[in-house]
Image (cartoon, rainbow, N blue to C red):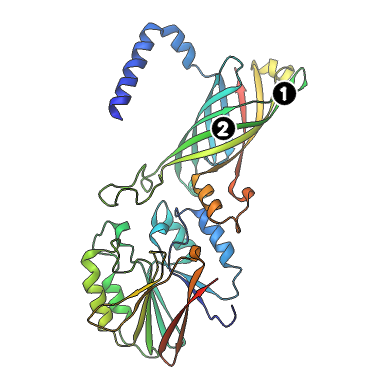
Amino acid sequence: MPDIEFVAIAGDLSEFGVLQEMEWVAKELKKMKAPYVAIIGNHDLVNKGPAVFKRMFGALNYSFIYRGIKFVCHDTNGREYDFNGSIPDIGWLAKELQPEAGVTGYVAISHVPPNSEDYDPKLVTPYHTLFDKTPGLLASFHAHTHTYSEFGYPSSTLPYVITATAGASEFLLVKIINNKISYERIFF
Amino acid sequence: MSAYFSRLSIVLVFMGMTLQSRAQKFLIPDDAILQYAGSIGYLSVGAGYELFGNKRGNIDINYGYVPESKGGALHIVTAKFAYRPFVINISNWAKIYPFNPGIFIRYTFNRNLGFNFDTVQYPKGYYYFSEAARPHLSFSNEFQLTKGKTLERTGLKALSIYSEFNTNDYYLVNYFQNTKALSVTDIFKVGIGIRAKF
C-alpha cells in the first residue's frame, strides 16, 4: 500500500511470547516499505516475552511525536499483572498527555481496550477520565478482541476503536489531516 | 493426581521389594548420552534405556543446561521415547538407523515459567498451553559402530553418533496459522549427539 507513513502493530506479535516467534514476525515485518512500531500485547507477556519484546521492539510504554501528533503507546494488559493496579500506568500516561510545545494532537495506542474483562477494572474510570480531560486527544486505538468495534464513554466524544486481527485479513487505515482524524477498515 | 502418584509409588516400592535384584538391573541404564543443542539444552547429558526384545525402542532421560551467554541460564529435564523401525547393515561393524520417530517432553525450571497458568489470575482455558512443559515431536538418524578396535579399547558395546530433528506445539501452531510465511523446515530444530552403550 503506497503513502503509508508508518505502521503501528497493536499487540500480540506472538502467540506464546517466545523468541523464535518474534524473530519470524520481525522477518515478515521487515518486508514492508513503511517503518513500524510495536505495542505490547498480552500474548507477548507470557513465557519470557517481556524480555524478548523489550530487546527486539523496545519499551512497553513509550511515545513519539510525528508531524505534530504525539503517539502514546502503552501496556494495558492488566490481567497479565494480576490486576495489581499498575497497568496501565496512569501516572506515566498523565505525564505523557500534558500539553507541550509542538504537539497539536494525541493518539493513544494499546492492546487491551478498557471495556475488556482483561483490563484492570480498578483503572477503567481513571483511564477514560484522564483521556476525557486531555484536549487534542483524537482517538484511542486497541486490538485484542480480534474483531472491529468502536465504543465510547458518555463523558466525552473520544472514539475508542478496536481493530481486527491481521488473521482476519483486516487492518485500519488512519488518516490525520489538520488535526482531524479519520479511519477506514481495509480488507485484504 | 497426587493419589495416583502415591499409589504408583507404593506399587513401585512393592515391586522393588519383591524384585529387588531384577529392579536394580532394570534401573541401570544401557546408554550414556551427550547431546549438543536440539531444544533440550545448549549441552545435555543423559541416560538411555533399551526397550522391547529387539532393543529398537529407547527411553532417554536428559539433563540440559543453557548458559547465560546463550540465553539462559536454564536447567532443562527431558524424557524421550523413540523407536528405530529401519536398520541398514553397512558392514559387520557398523549400522545406520535412518529414520527414528519419537516424542519427548522437556521441562524448563525457571521462575518465569509455570507448568500451568494461575487459576485465580486467569479464567479457565485462557491460555491453553504450558510455559515450562513443552511436548516435542522428533525424528533422528543414527550411525552406530558395533565392533572394532576403538570400541574394544573403550570396552563399550556400541558407539553412535546421531542427529535429531524436532519441533514442538508452539512451532506447529505458528506453522499452521502462518503456512504462507513459514515452511516445514522453519519449525524443525536440530541437535547432534553421541550415544555409548555399555
| Residue A29 position by quadrant | bottom right
Tag in front: 1 or 2: 2
Q: Who is closer to the viewer here, A47 or B197? A: A47
The reply to whether callout 1 and callout 2 are in contact (CB within 8 Å) is no
Q: Position of residue B83 (x, y in %)?
A: 59, 26
| Residue at 60% in and 45% down | B188
- Disc 2 marks which residue? B102
The amino acid pointed to by label 2 is: Gly
Q: Position of residue B194 (x, y in %)?
A: 62, 30
Neighbor class of circle 1 (other Cα within 10 Å; few <14, some 14-19, many 20+) is some
Q: Is residue B184 above or below residue B44?
A: below
| Residue A23 position by quadrant | bottom right
**In the displayed image of the protein, which residue is found farthest to the right?**
B91
Q: Position of residue A147 (x, y in %)?
A: 41, 67
Q: Please tell me which of labels 1 and 2 falls first in the chain.
A: 1
The amino acid pointed to by label 1 is: Lys
Quarter of the C terminus of chain B within the rendering = top right
Q: Who is closer to the viewer here, B95 or A149? A: A149
B28 left or right of B158 in image? left
What's the distance in space between the residues labelled 1 and 2, CA to CA?
A: 19 Å
| Residue at 47% in and 53% down | A18
Which numbered marker is on residue B95? Answer: 1
